[in-house]
Image: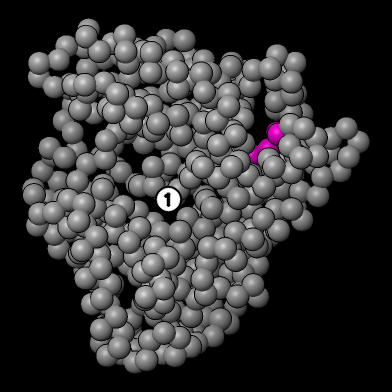
Amino acid sequence: MQLRVSRLSSPSPDDLPIEIVERKGHGHPDTLCDSLAESASIGLSRYYLEHFGAILHHNIDKALLLGGAARPAFGGGKVLKPIEITLAGRATRRFRGVNVPVEALVMEFSREWLAANVSNLEPRDVRIIPRIRETSSDLAALFLRQSVSGIPLANDTSYGVGFAPLDRLERAVLAVERRLGSADTKRDHPEIGDDLKVLGLRSGDTLKITVACAFVGRYVRDLADYYGKKESVRSLATSAAAEVVGGNIEVNVNTADGDTAESIYLTVTGLSAEAGDDGQVGRGNRVNGLITPYRPMSLEAAAGKNPVTHTGKIYNLLGDRMAHALVREIPGVAEARCYLLSCIGSPVSEPEVADIRLRLADAVSIETVEARAEQIVRAHLGSATELWREVIAGHCPVC
């Protein structure tokens, strides 16, 4: 393994004149795809473990959501055509002479996740279409070699990245979506749908946050009530951002709204997927919950990849944790960026490259922190072989 620790010299996004950050809430079409792919992987992992004593090879990391059709209305509305979600990938369908009902299980896991996480969607309003084929023989053989060696081997040559800490705009965007999407807020404001998107722009010291919020028609009486509730959302978002970062904050909500009932963001289910938008795995939040074009990002879709050997998932989770640990545990480290590259067939705990870049306080030299940084990095890489336990316990969100 080539492990390199160096000084980060490029400017932090917070020091640039402009920065953009986005978060898609759990009801956004892209996040729905990520979440269902991940629930399928976690569910299958648990099933394999229970029935065969080990997690078997699978990657269900492709999904496509095709929006339906709906007729929203104040006080109600109707879904005219269901949302269709196709989940695709590979999985072990037969092991030691025993058939695994992969597609039936994936449908079950998807229905359970939707019932637990989407408030206003009826089962009849969504159709789950599993398209999961037998895993390839070479990857299955590679996966099973760990049962002999005891060491999971990377099933892809891929990379993951992580950075810490979050800056002002990143914290503000995350705080706004979490406040609006929280159980407490939904209890007091049931008109707020599950489909939220928060786009943050920092220009100098000013933060401008634009919120797209799908309102649920059954909880909105008329146009005046809609605009009153929209103002409540704006107030909640402003408060959430101010609590974490303060300063000059401007918040706008549903900026495309017109002045008629036909030109506002009103829905039946609280989802744009009911009629207005489609979705796909990998187009949404990274494992830290954000989309950050001014930061290093991996294009890997972590959702749905198996948690034992797919470094496209493991290294993004580890990179994020590693970066936070470096900042938290080493005095003088103001920012950390971690880049991890795997080589297919090599142990997941031994990446080909671990490139660690640290922004240091002026009085701190790279030589004084290098040994401790390497120690932290090696400790986290050593945990790669056990990370799957946290993943299938639901402790490692990927979107």
* Left/right of residue 127 with respect to residue 79 in the rendered view: right
Front residue of 29/309: it is: 309
Residue 294 position within the rendered picture, expressed as x and y whole percent measured from the top left: 25, 40
In the displayed structure, 19 sits above or below 306; it is below
User: Residue at (68%, 40%) from the top-left corner?
Assistant: 45
Residue 160 position within the rendered picture, expressed as x and y whole percent measured from the top left: 44, 30
* Left/right of residue 285 with respect to residue 107 in the rendered view: left
Q: Secondary structure at mark 1?
A: loop
Q: Is 57 in the magenta? A: yes
User: Residue at (50%, 41%) from the top-left corner?
Assistant: 396
In the displayed structure, 23 sits above or below 323; it is below
Q: Which residue is mark 1?
A: 284
Q: Quadrant of residue 334?
A: top left
Residue 209 position within the rendered picture, expressed as x and y whole percent measured from the top left: 22, 60
Q: Residues within 10 Å of mark 1 (few under 14, many from 20)?
A: many
Q: Name the dominant secondary structure of the magenta segment.
A: loop
Q: What range is drawn magenta here?
A: 55-59
User: Residue at (64%, 61%) from the top-left corner?
Assistant: 112
Q: Quadrant of residue 255?
A: bottom left
Residue 150 position within the rendered picture, expressed as x and y whole percent measured from the top left: 68, 17
User: Residue at (41%, 59%) from the top-left corner?
Assistant: 25
Task: Say if residue 215 shows up in the picture.
Answer: no
In the displayed structure, 22 sits above or below 345; it is below
Q: Quadrant of residue 391?
A: top right
Give the amino acid type for the residue marked by disc 1 in the picture.
Gly
In the displayed structure, 202 sits above or below 354; it is below
* Left/right of residue 171 with respect to residue 279 in the rendered view: left
